[in-house]
Amino acid sequence: MGDARYFGDGLTYLNPSDLKGKLIAIEGTDGVGRSTHLEMLQEWLEVQGYGVITTGWTRSNLMSKTIEAAKAGNILDHWSLSLLYATDFADRLEHQIIPALRSGFVVLADRYIYTAFARDFVRSGDRKWIRDVFGFALIPDLVCYLRIDVETLALRVIETTGMNYWESGMDLRLGDDLYDSFKKYQSLMIKEFDKMAEEFHFNVVDARKSPEEIQEELRGHILPVLQNSKRTADLEPVGVQREP
Amino acid sequence: MTDHGYAKSPSHPYPGKLIIVEGIDGSGKSTQLLLLHKWLESKGHKVFFTEWNSSDLVKDTTKRGKKTKSLTPTTFSLLHATDFASRLYHHILPPLKAGMLVLADRYMYTAFSRDVVRGVSRDWVRKLYAFAIKPDMAFYYKIPIETAISRLLRGTRGQFKYYEAGMDMNLSPDVTESFRMFQSQILAEYDKIVDEFGLLTMDATQDIEAQQEHMRALVEDALRGYKPRRGTYGRRTLFWRRFDIPKSE
C-alpha cells in the first residue's frame, strides 16, 4: 500500500507511507461465513508464496478480556461499546496490522471499521461521531462485502451456531424474542452495510452462492490488488546496482 | 483550531448542575472540590461526586497494558474515553436528570491536555469527546510547575505517580525531572484550552482558605435560581452503582 492513507485524523506519531503489504478487509453481518472464507484465502495465498496474517474483531491482547467482561455486564450505552471496539482496533492496528504491512505481509481482516460504523449507527442514528473516532484507521486496499438477505441469514444462523444476545441486538429491544430481534437488528445492519457499499465502493459478493463460487469471486477481487504491487516492482530498473 | 461547535454548545437541558475542576497533580484542585462538597452539603444540597479514571474496567485494562508495555498514545486515549463515556452515562447523567449537583474531579479537558502531549491529534481527541455535555462551571487551578513539584514532594503522597510523571514516555530516567518535563507541556496545553472552552482560571498558589472563599462566591452566584431537589431526608443511597460492570476476571 505505497500510498497508504488514514481514514480521518490519523496517528500523528506514525507515518504510513512506508507500508509495503496489502490490507484486505472482509465485511459482512454475523454468521455470513467470513471466517471460513478467510481461512481458505489464507491457504490459497500462502501456497502462492505470500506472507499472510489475519486479524479479527475484538481479538487484541489488550482488549479481548475487557470486551468480554463488558458484554457480560451488558453495557447500556453505545458510546462505551463503540469505544471498546475502537480501543481493540487501535491495539491491533499499531501492534499487528501496521508492523505486518511494513514487512510486506498481506493482512486479511475479519471485519473492519465498517462493522463498528454499522453497529453504532443502528444504535445512535448518527454517522459522524463514530467515523471521527475511527479516523486513525488505515483505508484498506480492498473491501469485500459478503452480502446476504436476512431470511437466508436467519435460517443459516439457527442451523449452525444459534442466535446470541449481541448478534440479535437484544440491547436495542427491537423484538419480543431472540428471533424477532435478530431479524430486525440484522435487517438494519444489512441496510447500513448496503449504503456503505456504495459510499466506500465495497466489492459486493453474494453470500447465498455456494462456498466454492464465493471463494472464486473473492480471489477474483484480490488477485488484481496483489498483481498491482508486483507490476510496480517489475517496473524497477533491473540489473542497475545502486551505490550506497 | 477548527471550531467543532459542541464545546461552545448551549448548556445541557437537565435540572441539575455539573461543576468540574481541572489542573495538574499538586494544583490542589481535589482539596478545593472536597471543601466545596462539604459546604454544598452543609447548605442542604444533594451532591454527587465522581472522578477521572475510576472504573474497574479501565483500571484492569491499563494494568494489563502497563505490564506488557503495550499501551500506545491512541489506546491510552481511547481507554480513558471509554471510561468517561461509561461514567457519563451511569454516574453523571442520572443525578443531573434528577436535579442534583454533580461535582467532577477532572473532565474531558484532562484528555485534551494529557493525550495531546502524549501524541494524539488535537482535533481527533476533541471529536472523540463530542458526546460529552458542557459543564455548568469549569474551574482550572493554575499553578507554576515548581510549586506543584515541591507540594507533591513534601506532601503526604511523597512521590509521583508513574503515569502522571509520564515515566512511560522515557523523557528522563529521573522521576522528578520526567514529571517536570511532562507536566510543563500539559500546562501549556491547558493554557490553550482555557481560552478555547472558557474555563475559569483560579490562582492555585493562594492559601487554601482564600481559594475556597473565591470558589464558593463564584458557585453561589452561579447557583442563584437553582432549585435543589430533595428525595429522602435520610442517608443518600447510590442506586446507579447497580449498573457497574461486574469483574469477570
Image (cartoon, rainbow, N blue to C red):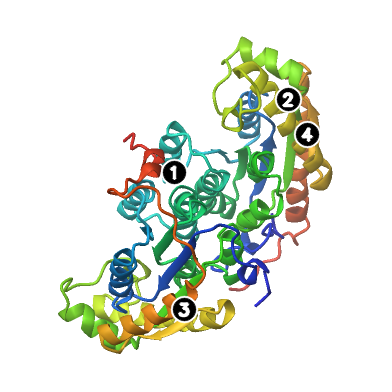
In three-dimensional space, the C-alpha distance between marks 2 and 3, rounded to whole angstroms, equals: 69 Å
Badge 4 marks a residue whose secondary structure is helix
What kind of residue is marked 3? Asp
Q: State left or right for residue B122 relative to residue B224.
A: right
Q: Residue at position x 43%, y 51% from top?
A: B91
Circle nearer the viewer, 1 or 2: 1
Q: State left or right for residue A35 relative to residue A189.
A: left
Q: Residues within 10 Å of mark 2 (few under 14, many from 20)?
A: some
Badge 1 marks a residue whose secondary structure is loop
Q: Earlier in the sequence, mark 4 or mark 1?
A: 1
Q: Which residue is identified by label 2?
A: A215
Check if mark 3's residue and mark 4's residue have beta carbons within 8 Å.
no
What kind of residue is marked 1? Met
Q: Earlier in the sequence, mark 4 or mark 2?
A: 4
Q: State left or right for residue A129 relative to residue A54.
A: right
Q: Residue at position x 64%, y 16% from top?
A: A179
In three-dimensional space, the C-alpha distance between marks 1 and 2, rounded to whole angstroms, equals: 31 Å
Q: Residue at position x 68%, y 69% from top?
A: B5
Label 2 marks a residue whose chain is A
Circle nearer the viewer, 4 or 1: 4
- The outermost residue toward the right is A198
Say if residue A130 shows up in the picture.
yes
Specify the label residue A63 is tagged with: 1
Q: Which residue is identified by label 3?
A: B221
In three-dimensional space, the C-alpha distance between marks 3 and 1, rounded to whole angstroms, equals: 45 Å
